[in-house]
């Protein structure tokens, strides 16, 4: 939310759009950043009283909502520095937020349009859930800015790239896809999260949509700009810098993305009749990577309406007894409705020593209906690599297919799939 430029300072009612966006993100189970977007008002202290007012309200409303992140100063700029201006401002705003939200992440902008993370690293805030913003545009910023990031990381300062673009720093020019790939590969190697600028149909190269695209979504490939196609590819691939080929070969990329769009759940011609089926595809085909990304769809092929809180699904795999971590990246029904637990087997069986059990808090499936995509992600404590090729439930498929090696239960009774040679579990992680 802009502060100046027709934003909150002139029209406080724009905060209602922020609330709409947060509620939508809560329903979808995705992260949302509530951003105090300073630009022309380059010193955050200029409107500090209004910032306190705004973040007091937002933190009261959303301070215990786990997918809400607060960004308290977008791009400090001009005659502004960390020690004199930004850090004292941040300490005051943090004190307001922490009264309502003890744990949610707060992101603090840094000097020179959020490039001077090195300054913040030398004098960090005394708050364990603070991160520091780094912004870049691929056509303008390169190795020298990555050097600043490396310095900050070496000092233990957590970084979040809350704005970057494929263009130059004006938001136009380019797109610079080779430089963007280099940046994304770097961010992935450092495990730095990012947000791309921008989802709009503005007539500039950083916009993800072509001018005139619908304001209501439902976009086709022809609605996406070269930047939009590149960024979409990298979001869908896990942003490891290895994809995003839309700009270098837009025709080939369009065909690839159209194929992805055709591979939607619920369209497997081999759907089993008169039961509830599990469909699966691999979100990541790297069998030796440090993450497992099962993508699931539950389809009700029976003639009765099913209560989802009676349904559980088990994905069987090998962990070598390492601690496991779970993330829901996307669920059509909303990640907030997804539950999970890890269960280790007392004795390893063929292709598994653990299973992930996915469940649902509420909802129903009418006859013929499906949950839609559920995209989940698993990783070991310490991010060590898996060896998925021998995992019982793993199928190296980019398209949704029925699989009997992911089992489904109704009220604890197996109704779909085949378990590996079963041994009782020993404990729940």
Image (tube, rainbow, N blue to C red):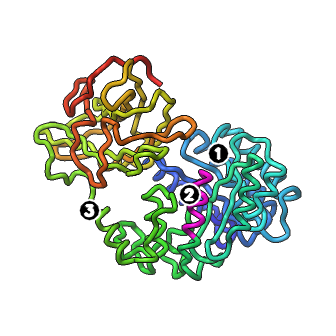
Residues shaded magenta? 180-195
Give above or below for 216 relative to 85.
below
Asked whether the residues under the numbered discs 1 and 2 touch, taking CB atoms below 8 Å apart as contact, a structural biologist would say no
Q: Which residue is mark 2?
A: 18
- The secondary structure type at the circle numbered 3 is helix
Task: State the image coordinates of residue 126 (x, y, percent, origin top left).
Answer: 79, 42
- In this picture, residue 109 sits left or right of residue 86: left
- Mark 3 touches mark 1? (CB < 8 Å): no
Q: Disc 1 on helix, strand or loop?
A: loop
Q: Residue at x 49, y 73 (%)?
A: 227
Q: Please state if 303 lies on the left or on the right of 193 as rendered.
A: left
Return the x and y of residue 284 as percentages of the image width and height. Answer: 40, 51
Q: Residue at x 31, y 35 (%)?
A: 392
Vertical relation: 30 (above or below) 222? above
- Pick the front one: 121 or 318: 318
Report the front residue among 145 and 337.
Answer: 145
**Which residue is painted at 44% across and 41% down in the image?**
336
Task: Choose the circle earlier in sequence order: 2 or 3.
Answer: 2
Q: Earlier along the polypeptide chain: callout 3 or callout 1?
A: 1
Q: Nearer the viewer, mark 1 or mark 2?
A: 1
**3 or 1: mark nearer the eye:** 3
Please give the label number shown on residue 262: 3
Q: Which residue is mark 1?
A: 105
Asked if residue 256 can be seen in this view, the reply is yes
Report if residue 183 lies within the magenta region: yes
- The image quadrant of residue 48 is bottom right
Q: Position of residue 252 (x, y in %)?
A: 35, 74
């Amino acid at each position: 939310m802009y502060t100046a430029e027709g934003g909150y300072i002139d029209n406080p009612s724009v905060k209602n759009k922020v609330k709409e966006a947060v509620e939508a993100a809560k329903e979808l189970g995705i992260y949302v950043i509530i951003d105090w977007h300073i630009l022309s008002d380059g010193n955050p202290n200029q409107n500090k009283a209004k910032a306190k007012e705004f973040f007091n309200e937002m933190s009261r409303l959303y301070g215990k909502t786990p997918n809400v992140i607060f960004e308290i100063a977008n791009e400090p700029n001009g005659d502004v520095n960390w020690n004199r201006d930004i850090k004292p401002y941040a300490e005051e705003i943090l004190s307001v937020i922490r009264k309502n939200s003890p744990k949610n992440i707060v992101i603090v902008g840094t000097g020179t349009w959020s490039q001077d993370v090195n300054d913040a690293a030398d004098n960090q805030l005394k708050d364990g859930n603070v991160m520091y913003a780094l912004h870049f545009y691929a056509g303008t910023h390169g190795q020298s800015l990555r050097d600043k990031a490396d310095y900050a990381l070496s000092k233990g300062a957590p970084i979040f790239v809350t704005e970057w673009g494929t263009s130059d720093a004006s938001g136009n020019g380019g797109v610079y896809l080779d430089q963007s790939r280099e940046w994304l590969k770097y961010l992935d190697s450092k495990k730095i999260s990012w947000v791309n600028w921008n989802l709009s149909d503005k007539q500039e190269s950083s916009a993800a949509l072509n001018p005139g695209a619908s304001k209501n979504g439902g976009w086709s490939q022809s609605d996406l700009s070269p930047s939009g196609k590149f960024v979409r590819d990298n979001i869908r691939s896990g942003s490891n810098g290895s994809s995003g080929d839309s700009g270098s070969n837009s025709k080939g990329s369009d065909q690839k993305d159209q194929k992805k769009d055709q591979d939607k759940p619920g369209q497997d011609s081999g759907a089993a009749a008169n039961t509830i089926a599990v469909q699966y595809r691999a979100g990541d085909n790297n069998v030796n990577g440090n993450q497992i990304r099962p993508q699931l769809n539950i389809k009700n092929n029976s003639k009765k309406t099913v209560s989802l809180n009676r349904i559980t699904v088990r994905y069987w795999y090998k962990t070598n007894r390492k601690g496991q971590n779970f993330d829901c990246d996307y669920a059509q029904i909303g990640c907030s409705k997804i539950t999970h637990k890890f269960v280790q087997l007392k004795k390893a069986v063929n292709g598994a020593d653990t299973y992930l059990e996915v469940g649902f808090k509420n909802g129903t499936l009418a006859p013929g209906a499906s949950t839609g995509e559920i995209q989940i992600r698993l990783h070991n404590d310490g991010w060590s690599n898996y060896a998925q090729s021998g995992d019982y439930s793993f199928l190296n498929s980019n398209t949704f297919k029925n699989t009997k090696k992911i089992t489904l239960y109704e009220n604890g009774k197996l109704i779909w799939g085949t378990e590996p040679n079963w041994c009782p579990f020993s404990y729940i992680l």
